[in-house]
Image: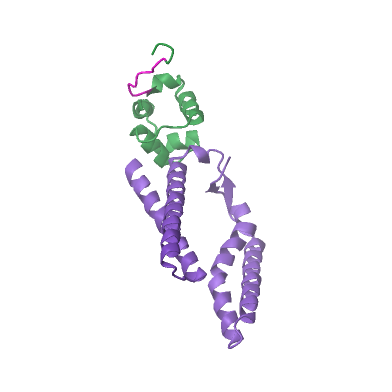
Chain colours: A green, B purple
Amino acid sequence: MENIIAEQRGERSWSQAHLAALLGVSRQTVISIERGRFDPSLPLAFRIAEVFGCRIEDLFTPQATPVSDPEKS
Amino acid sequence: MATTTRTAGKAPLSAYVLSVLAALVLASIVGAIASLFYDENRLLGFVIFAACTAGTFFALGWVLFVSKYTVESDEHAEDNIERRWYDKATSGAFHNIITTAGIALFVLAITRLEVSGMVVLTLILVLAVVSFAVRFWVARRRDS
């Protein structure tokens, strides 16, 4: 899952450690989320969105995987 | 559920003293029990087992009496990537143990080899620790 957390954090001139403290997680967690190597849990995603004052879908973009409708197939 | 902790502050001196005393008492008890099974040299049995278990009991004493002052619960522990590494490593190590134990049991059943329980348990313990450590290290390297 891609995200714009690094950009959002940069706009606010926050360090990764500061964001980690705001979210109540480790700095390594923030680093891995920003690099797209760790998809946060739903509660953490909500906290991230709350910290940046936006919606989850404004921050995270799912990789293009088509959703199949079993009733149509 | 909070399963990890964060550093909080210092514990009073009495907590440290209590933890050390508890460790010494527990290690002495283990040493005394072990000496019952070492008829040839009871004192040596007592000293060896008390010394070997003292470290573990010091850690236990710290957990029971000191940690409540020095660490605090982390309510967001589940959200950390370190938790995912831990979960993946423990899960993988468990599967390693099941598979290896199954294969080893199969081989022993066919060959009718006799292996002491001490050797088997030691090998299982070493396998679990090594498997966990390697898997945790690999997950950390991959996700960092």
Q: Is residue A72 visible?
A: yes
Is residue B128 highlighted in magenta? no
Q: Is residue B144 visible?
A: no
Residue at the spot 46% in from the left edge and 24% down from the top edge: A49
Q: Foreground: B71 or B40?
A: B40
Q: Foreground: B8 or B92?
A: B92
From the top left corner, tell me how far across and down residue B130 is, in percent: 40, 58
Image position of A46 with respect to B13: above or below: above
Residue at the spot 38% in from the left edge and 50% down from the top edge: B135
Along the horizontal axis of the image, is A64 left or right of A49? left
Residue at the spot 64% in from the left edge and 70% down from the top edge: B26
Region of the chain picked out in magenta, as a range: A61-69
- Toward which corner of the image does residue B82 lie, by quadrant? top left
Q: Quadrant of the N terminus of chain B?
A: top right
Residue at the spot 43% in from the left edge and 34% down from the top edge: A19
From the top left corner, tell me how far across and down residue B76 is, in percent: 53, 38
Q: Please name the predominant secondary structure of the magenta segment in the image.
A: loop
Q: How many marks?
A: 0
Q: Foreground: B61 or A73?
A: A73
